[in-house]
C-alpha cells in the first residue's frame, strides 16, 4: 500500500493517483486532515472513491499533529466507508 496523498481536504481538487497504481485500489491510500465538518468528510470520501483509493482516512484534526485523536465525525465516516457506492454495487452485481 502506498499513501498517494496526505494533504488538507481543501487541496484535493486536482490530485490524481499515478496511472501505474490505478489497477489495484487496495494499493492506494489517501489521508486528508483539517476537514471542517461532516459534509467536508463526505466530499473527501467521494473524491477518494473517484480516485479509486482502497484506503481512506479523513480527520478534522489539524497540524502539527492531525493524528492525535479520532475525528469528531468518526462514526459517520466508518458508516459511509462501509456502505457500497452505486457504481461498486453495480460492479458486484455484474461479477455475480
Image: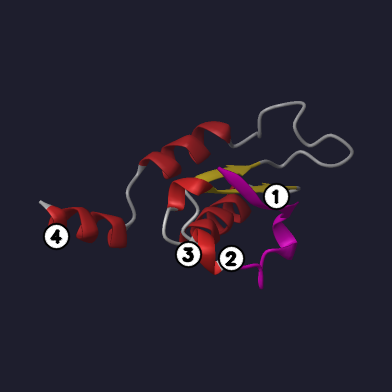
> What is the crowding at mark 1: few (fewer than 14 residues within 10 Å), some, or many (at least 20)?
many
Q: Mark 4 touching mark 3, by CB under 8 A?
A: no
Give the CA separation, mark 1 to mark 4: 35 Å
- Give the label on residue 22, or none: none
Is mark 2 in CB contact (under 8 Å) with mark 4?
Answer: no
Q: Label 3, on which residue?
A: 50
Q: Is residue 86 left or right of residue 56?
A: left
Q: Which residue is mark 4?
A: 94
Q: Nearer the viewer, mark 2 or mark 4?
A: 2
Q: Residue at x 77, y 26 (%)?
A: 68
Residue 67 horizontal/vertical position (percent) = 75, 32
Residue 94 falls left or right of residue 8: left
Q: Residues within 10 Å of mark 3 (few under 14, many from 20)?
A: few
Q: CA distance from mark 3 to mark 2?
A: 13 Å
In the picture as drawn, the residue positioned furthest to the bottom comes out as: 14
Viewer-proximal residue among 87 and 25: 25
Q: Residue at x 14, y 60 (%)?
A: 94
SS at badge 4? helix
- In this view of the protein, which residue sits in the foreground, 93 or 41? 93
Q: CA distance from mark 2 to mark 4?
A: 27 Å
Residue on which the image places disc 1: 35
Specify few, some or many for label 4: CA neighbours under 10 Å numbering under 14, 14-19, or 20 or more.
few
Label at residue 18: 2
Tell me which segment is drawn in magenta: 1-16
| Residue at image point 42% right, 53% down | 24
Q: Residue furthest top?
A: 69
- Number of the front mark, 3 or 2: 2
Left or right for 93, reference 31 = left
Amino acid at each position: 500500500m502506498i499513501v498517494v496523498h496526505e494533504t488538507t481536504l481543501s487541496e484535493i481538487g486536482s490530485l490524481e493517483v499515478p496511472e501505474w497504481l490505478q489497477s489495484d485500489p487496495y494499493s492506494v491510500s489517501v489521508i486528508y486532515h483539517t476537514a471542517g465538518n461532516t459534509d467536508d468528510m463526505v466530499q473527501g470520501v467521494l473524491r477518494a472513491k473517484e480516485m479509486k483509493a482502497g484506503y481512506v482516512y479523513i480527520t478534522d484534526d489539524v497540524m502539527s499533529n492531525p493524528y492525535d485523536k479520532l475525528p469528531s465525525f468518526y462514526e459517520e465516516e466508518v458508516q459511509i466507508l462501509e456502505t457500497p457506492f452505486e457504481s461498486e454495487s453495480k460492479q458486484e452485481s455484474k461479477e455475480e
